[in-house]
Amino acid sequence: MSATTASLADLRGADEPRFGGKSTALGELLTGGIPVPPGFAVSVDAFREHLRAADLDREIHEALRGLDVSDTDALGAAAARAEAAVRAAEVPAAVRDEIAARYAELCAAVGDPNAGVAVRSSAVGEDSAEATFAGQQETYLWVRGADAIVERVRDCWASLYSAEATAYRAHHGDAGDEPAMGVTVQLMADADVAGVMFTCNPVSGDPSVVAIDAAWGLGLGVVGGDVTPDEFLVSKVSRDVVRRQISRKEVEHRPAPGGGTEVVPVDDERASAPCLDDVALAALLDVARAVQAHFGSHQDIEWALAGGELYVVQSRPVTVMAKTEGPKGASAMDLIMHQFGVPGR
């Protein structure tokens, strides 16, 4: 493990202060034998070196000093100034070189010289049992090439100072702390179906079921609220599907030819068809139980089915029940949207 990067497989929970919650959770999953796409993590040290090399600390402190986060105009202006400063600075050469070397290793391992990756923010203190920064900091999908990855890493660093993230820290009593950002770089799974699942029913708190929401294509359609997903409740005790609600899914997110993602229409027959059968639901149930057992707590899991293989791409403790009061009769996905500030479906 170097000063600025590490393989995800080498990370454990104790590394969270150096690499952030998202990266270390993936390392823990790999330790537990959970199917996770390979990748590497960029450390908090790289972020701090970026700030130091461009003398950004002073400018960011000046932008945020004395900020009243209840003043939305002032918050927006301060956040924009801080984010722009981070994006304008050149990433230190040593950090760029190490990211490029790690990416080359990943490409060689999978036999693709231009492998597509997800670049995800992994802030220190996020995805804890008490709070989650989910949806407030950036993730970029289907990024190809070392130069593009470095740019997206820098964009993740900048998102640490977004208006949403800055206000969140202030509201949770963290305004005086120095925020820190790691980044996860993870091989993309070219998902045929993707979604989220909870190892309990987050609406009722029932621990005997797994709640699964799924749609065609990448999980961005589900977590972004672009699609009303199929919803399933599967019993951990009997393994029966105790609830099955199939929705019309008219669009899906797919890899775009030039990088990134695009939204494409789903043909009429597939739009109304269930995107998971009982075999896939049984596999998701098994993975959900394994993830819960590894962490010893209920988990909010993002997953993807690609070419018949099931992968976990993120996992965080369930905080929705304790921290969010959703509308009566809400589904699991409604609570996620409510937590992220997205209007209900």
Image (cartoon, helix red, strand yellow):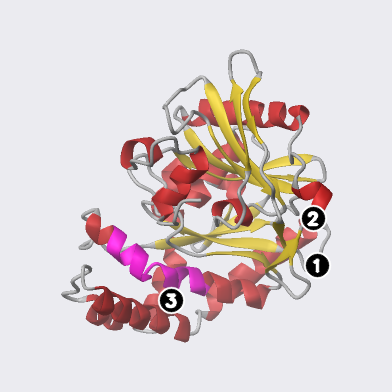
Q: Amino acid at mark 1?
A: Pro
| Kind of residue indicated by mark 2 | Val
Residue 89 appears in the figure: no
Q: Residues within 10 Å of mark 2 (few under 14, many from 20)?
A: few
Which quadrant, please, contains the N terminus? bottom right
Instruction: Please indicate, yes or no, whether residue 90 appears anywhere in the rendered image.
Output: yes
Disc 3 from disc 1: Cα separation = 27 Å
Q: Is residue 158 magenta?
A: yes
Q: Residue 113 bears which disc, if any?
A: 1
Q: Quadrant of residue 343?
A: bottom left
The residue labelled by disc 2 is 110
Q: Residues within 10 Å of mark 1 (few under 14, many from 20)?
A: some
Residue drawn where x is 42% and y is 27% of the image: 204
SS at circle 1 = loop
Amino acid type at image mark 3: His
Circle 2: element type? helix
Q: Alpha-carbon neighbours of circle 3 within 10 Å: few (<14), some, or many (≥20)?
A: many
Q: CA distance from mark 2 to mark 3?
A: 30 Å
Q: Earlier in the sequence, mark 3 or mark 1?
A: 3
> Residue at label 3?
50
Q: Which residues are magenta?
A: 154-168
Rounded to the nearest whole Å, what is the CA distance between mark 1 and mark 2?
8 Å
